[in-house]
Amino acid sequence: MKVLRAGLLTTVQDIGRWGFQHLGVPVAGPMDVFSHRLANALIGNDPKAATLEITLAGPELEFLEDRCFVVAGAAFDLYLDDSFINSNRIINVLSGQCLRFGRRRRGARAYLSVEGGIDVPVFLGSRATHTASRMGGFEGRALRDGDVVSFAVLDETRSRGFSKIFDRRNIVPSGGADVRVLRSPNGKMFKTRTIERLFSGRYIVSTESDRMAFRLQGESLSMLVYGEMLSMPTSQGAIQVPRDGTPIVLMADRQTIGGYPVIGNVIDADLPTLGQLVPGDWVRFEECDNETALRAAILKERMLLSQEMDKKC
């Protein structure tokens, strides 16, 4: 397909570049892995197939061959030529037709999955884009006007997901979200009242946020028992507290190690919700235990598996 208008930040993403963090290679991948996998499941792709991640302002794309596609995640007004179409549903498109992303109504990031997946070179086992290092994806960068993106060759024996709408109103946030957090082993570095402040306050996603990290505005968490720690491996959802006390939540393009103390970590099941927030949205942190986090992860996985196994020829 040809990119007529690239939008604000449209990148190729798959589930990420895992297995190389010990060499300093970032994972990258989707900010909302649930929506990414859902788009692939509905179209009948492998969960690892590459999609387009579309951020805040969407693109206009001309299809250069017949293909089917699904858009999942953030709610945009979608148009195929001049006709309104639904997200979370298989759409058949003919060569020459144009897909346009209009007004964004809810959430921050949508995922466009085409039959077979987006075809860009595999680098270190992944097609994911990490723009800061110009690694992977489409020439290591976000799409630009005039780019032509290739599709993978279709396997004629593959199955396709049911053409039905998947209700995501209870998943994609609007204006803010409550997310659950596990306490970090570094919690001993913080005074009790500092940890209580994290779970009682409400923070705002700063305009300085990006795919690497969300910087939050709100009550300071700077009351440390003792100074900074040695650098340690990072994880998506880790809530770091630098010297100025402003919480930073690490996201998909995070660095592989960091030296700021970590007060807690957003649970895996709530990371997709966090990834759908936009600057100006609020976030509240709710403490949970390991059992709750595990049950939430299993529930999310069952939702996806129900789509991945729900096929028709």
Image: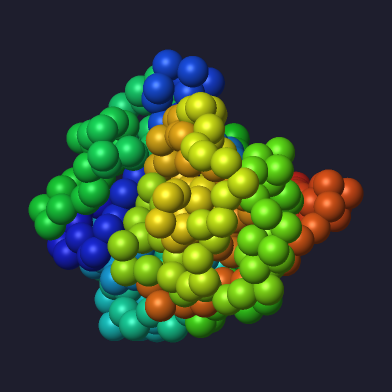
Q: Which residue is found at the position 56% from the left and 72% from the top?
A: 283
In the image, residue 85 lies at what x, y percent? 44, 78
Q: Which is more toward the observer, 13 or 212?
A: 212
Question: Which corner quadrant of the image does residue 25 belong to?
Answer: top left
Q: Is residue 77 visible?
A: yes
In the image, residue 93 lies at what x, y percent? 37, 62
Q: Which residue is found at the position 51% from the left and 82% from the top?
A: 175
Q: Is residue 251 visible?
A: no
Classify residue 28 as left or right of residue 161: left
Question: Which corner quadrant of the image does residue 28 belong to?
Answer: top left
Q: Which residue is found at the position 68% from the left and 59% from the top?
A: 195
Quick one: which residue is furthest to the right in this view?
A: 291
Q: Is residue 151 above or below residue 42?
A: above
In the image, residue 244 lies at what x, y percent? 40, 56
Quick one: which residue is furthest to the front in this view?
A: 226
Quick one: which residue is furthest to the left in this view?
A: 146
Q: Is residue 132 above or below residue 25?
A: below
